[in-house]
Image (cartoon, rainbow, N blue to C red):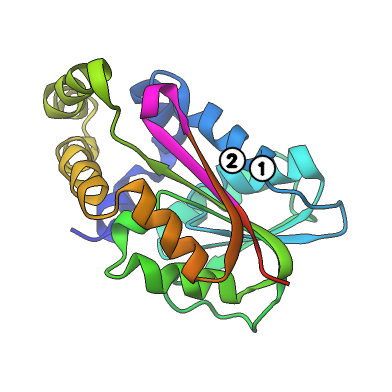
């Protein structure tokens, strides 16, 4: 199932349930992601896979910068636009349809770029990273948030949650969350196996990003990666 189909029914309550089902960690990860983006108030950041605009709004709050958010899902974008209006941030944030694999922007348009939970949904993560980097100015920061698989003693509790807890919670919530609950565990596990962190960091470097760093958060359940485009 592609991301656009999977997440289309979730927009209205997405942020609330993402917070609850991640035990409050998802907003924390997004805040840390934004903290890695070194931009100034007059700069413009492209937020890819913006969804309900949670990261776009956090960028505007933390950095007072301008944000262009793009996403494939019209349903998620509609909720995002409502959130932006409610926050009084329409002068800072613009949301539009767009595909991460072929961004509708010229080379080097943006001072920075963020993306969230994107690479598991594209056929070629390395090619997508190259496309994202293309839109960033030389010297600009690129940062991304993805789910991770905890290591060691934390792996069994994680497996129990994604195999039983998430599907069970999704069935209770309804409105498409059961499909998400059954999809996420295998999706995260398969992506981690095919794109372990060392390989992923190399793909960032191959895309023209230097000084690439990554931090595992919440016992490894989330991974934030960031670096600067070569000048």
Check disc 2 and report the residue beneath it.
Answer: 33
Image side of residue 81 versus residue 87, left or right: left
Quadrant showing the C terminus? bottom right
Report x, y in % for residue 86.
Answer: 67, 40
**Where does the magenta region start and end?**
216-226
Q: Residue at x 55, y 37 (%)?
A: 30
**Which residue position is annotated with label 1?**
36
> On the image, which quarter does residue 33 sit in?
top right
Q: Is residue 174 above or below residue 36?
A: above
Q: Is residue 102 visible?
A: yes
- Crowding around mark 2 (Cα neighbors within 10 Å: few <14, some 14 to 19, many 20+) is many
The structure residue drawn at horizontal position 25% and vertical position 52%, both measured from the top left corner, is 6
Residue 98 in view, yes or no: no
Does the stretch in magenta take in 123? no
- Compare residues 182 and 93 and report the one nearer the observer: 182
Residue 47, picture quadrant: bottom right
Q: What secondary structure is the stretch in magenta mostly built from?
A: strand
Residue neighbourhood size for the residue with mark 1, other residues' Cα within 10 Å, grouped as few (<14), some (14–19), many (≥20): some
């Amino acid at each position: 199932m592609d991301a656009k189909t999977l997440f289309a029914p979730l927009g209205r309550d997405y942020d609330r349930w993402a917070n609850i089902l991640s035990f409050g960690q998802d907003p924390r990860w997004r805040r840390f992601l934004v903290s890695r983006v070194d931009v100034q108030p007059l700069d413009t950041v492209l937020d890819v896979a913006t969804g309900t605009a949670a990261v776009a709004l956090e960028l505007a709050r933390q950095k007072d910068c301008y944000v262009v958010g793009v996403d494939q899902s019209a349903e998620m974008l509609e909720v995002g636009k409502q959130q932006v209006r409610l926050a009084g941030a329409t002068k800072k944030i613009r949301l539009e349809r767009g595909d991460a694999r072929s961004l509708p922007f010229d080379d080097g348009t943006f001072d920075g770029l963020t993306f969230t939970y994107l690479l598991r949904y594209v056929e070629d993560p390395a090619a997508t990273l190259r496309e994202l980097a293309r839109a960033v100015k030389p010297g600009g920061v690129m940062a991304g948030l993805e789910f991770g698989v905890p290591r060691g003693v934390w792996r069994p509790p994680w497996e129990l949650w994604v195999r039983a807890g998430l599907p069970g919670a999704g069935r209770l919530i309804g409105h498409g969350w059961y499909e998400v609950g059954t999809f996420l565990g295998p999706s995260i596990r398969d992506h981690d196996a095919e794109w372990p962190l060392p390989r992923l960091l190399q793909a960032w470097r191959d895309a023209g990003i230097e000084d690439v760093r990554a931090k595992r958060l919440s016992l490894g359940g989330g991974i934030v990666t960031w670096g600067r485009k070569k000048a």
